[in-house]
Amino acid sequence: MINVKDQVCEALSSRLLNVSDAYPRDWASLPAVQYIEEDNRVAEWTDDRETISYCRYKVDIWNNRSTSETAKTVDEVMSSLGLKRTQCADVDDPSGLKHKVMRYEMYIDVDTNQVFHGVN
């Protein structure tokens, strides 16, 4: 397993103000961004028995206006870390806020730290 959570936190926090790995507490400062590491596991994927680490992150964005600009920033940040967006959807939110969910994933060769986006 390779831990990239600290890098995700630092990168998102450098570009956005209200970022947390927990449910947002500060609803007065929007947009609010929550990132969650949904999966981080080591698996043997190749015939050569190379160790591959798989990571998947979920990012939630809430705003009282459009989430588009924040989503664009999140996409730039996550992409710069080597994470590839695999899902992006608007979600009905009973609070009346705009809510977007984005998912990202990456594969990392544990021996070389090389990032790639698929396993053949």
Image (spheres, rainbow, N blue to C red):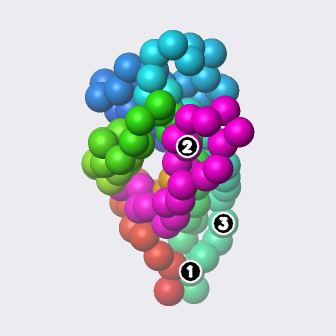
Q: Are marks 3 and 1 in contact (CB under 8 Å)?
A: no
Q: As shown in the figure, which amino acid type bears the numbered disc 1?
A: Thr
Q: In this rendering, which labeled residue sits more in front, label 2 or label 1?
A: 2
Is residue 95 inside the magenta stretch?
Answer: yes
Closer to us: 30 or 23 = 30
Q: Are marks 2 and 1 in contact (CB under 8 Å)?
A: no
Closer to us: 63 or 41 = 63
Where residue 109 appears, x then y in whole percent? 46, 62
Q: Which residue is mark 3?
A: 43
Where residue 98 appears, x then y in whole percent? 52, 41
Left or right of residue 62, residue 112 in this image: left
Where residue 20 appears, x then y in whole percent? 55, 24
Tell me which segment is drawn in magenta. 81-101
Q: Which residue is mark 2?
A: 99
Is residue 68 inside the magenta stretch?
Answer: no
Q: In this rendering, which labeled residue sits more in front, label 3 or label 2?
A: 2
Residue at 51%, 13% in the rendered image: 28
Q: Which residue is mark 1?
A: 46
Residue 110 visible somewhere in the drawing: no
Q: As shown in the figure, which amino acid type bears the numbered disc 2?
A: His
- Which callout, 2 or 1, points at the residue further toward the start of the chain? 1
Other-residue count near label 2 (Cα within 10 Å), few / some / many at <14 / 14–19 / ≥20: many
> Looking at the image, which residue sits at the far right?
94
Q: As shown in the figure, which amino acid type bears the numbered disc 3?
A: Ala
